[in-house]
Amino acid sequence: MKKKIKVIFQILFVLTILLLFFSMNYIIEKPYKHISVNSEESSNTDDSSNEENKEKSYIKWVEFNITFEALDKAAKLDISSHVNNEEVKLNWIEILAYISTKYGGDFKKYKTKDVDELVEKLRNGDTIENLTKDMKNYSYFYESIEAVLGQYIGDYSIEEENENGEKSFVQKYGIKVFSPIAKGYSYNHYDDFGASRSYGYKRIHLGHDIMGSIGTPIIAVESGIVEVAGWNQYGGWRIGIRSFDRKRYYYYAHLRKDHPFAKDLYEGKTVEAGDVIGYLGMTGYSAKENVNNIDVPHLHFGIQLIFDESQKEGTNQIWIDLYNITKFLSKNKSEVYLKYPDTKDYERKINTIDGNNWD
Ligand SMILES: [Zn+2]
């Protein structure tokens, strides 16, 4: 009798192992399901342009679902290891890519213990290269997370005043991106990515709506170059800013009727993270310019990832869920003041310079 039970347990054990093996395979395959090699140029039969014919391989899809809790923990570890000049400098992108790979991109599995264990190994001298050498999807997760968060933490300088009232720039290490909503202005938001919209034609919501008061100063999240500043049938008055590495396109829409943009904002201008760029409103859903046709005043905030310039327009666009990112960005808000009362234009109070701009 006892032998029989033992055999049954052995069979159950083998079945469980098999089940685990197949489910792991499924999970690990998942992030790759949208990645395919671009073969648009394969129809070109000119033999002399073989070099150009080489198929380009780049990331075709990113689902950003790292929780605020995980972002916050990894960011704190990275920053404190640098600020305290610890022997082992931690890199939050590596930490997040490691746990993303471990979870197959599913952050419902997130446990702080997993981060703690990784950090302990790194502090004991193990390297991320060694720890990830057998994780075949690590490079995919690293590249996609780096594309989103790569410029969020690092060196920057901030203007500080000494006791004599003299201002000078001080070098710091930390979060160098800002909340799109200025400091002291209230807002509310919920995870609305992918919800359906019905204006014009049926399409899904590819951004994040932040409900606030009309006139709330809108802040540049990351430094970059203003690519568009004008009217669009859906977005109304909107601003598009491209990051310096060209991988991120920040989109701020439904800006204020009659006064959508900050003073001196123009296409081609370089803006610093933390600058006032415009004002919250309810324009859009109108072919006619400067029309309020949005029911609830809000900022439509979007981030598009661009791994290859062909992804900028058309049907291959990658927009990411910004709910957790917006929560993370609220840790760093830009303080503003009414600098030009006659035109009701605001400006930031404290200047910062992104480390990237240094020569
Ligand atoms: Zn929206």
Image (tube, rainbow, N blue to C red):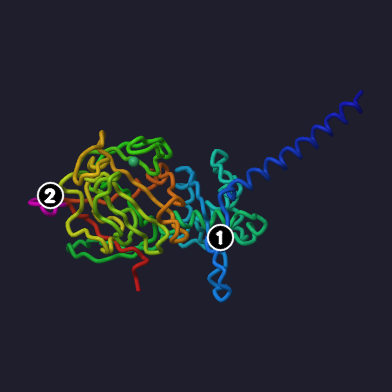
Residue 125, horizontal then vertical, whole percent: 61, 61
Which residue bears the numbered disc 1? 39
Range of residues picked out in magenta: 339-345
Residue 99, horizontal then vertical, whole percent: 57, 49
Q: 133 above or below 70?
A: below
Q: Is mark 1 within 8 Å of ligand 1?
A: no
Hey, what amino acid is under mark 2?
Lys
Residue at 90% across / 26% down in the picture?
4
Q: 355 above or below 319?
A: below
Left or right of residue 84: residue 185: left
Which residue bears the numbered disc 2? 344
Residue at 35% across / 55% down in the picture?
177
Pointer 1: residues within 10 angstroms few (<14), some, or many (20+)?
few
View quadrant of ligand 1:
top left
Residue extending furthest toward the top:
1
Hey, what amino acid is under mark 1?
Ser
> Helix, strand or loop at disc 2?
loop
Q: Is residue 233 visible?
A: yes
Pointer 2: residues within 10 angstroms few (<14), some, or many (20+)?
few
Left or right of residue 141: residue 15: right
Alpha carbons under labels 1 and 2: distance apart: 52 Å
Residue 294, horizontal then vertical, whole percent: 25, 37
225 drawn magenta? no
Residue 6 falls in image quadrant: top right
Residue 300 falls in image quadrant: top left
Left or right of residue 130: residue 283: left
Residue extending furthest toward the bottom:
48
Residue at 62% across / 60% down in the picture?
126
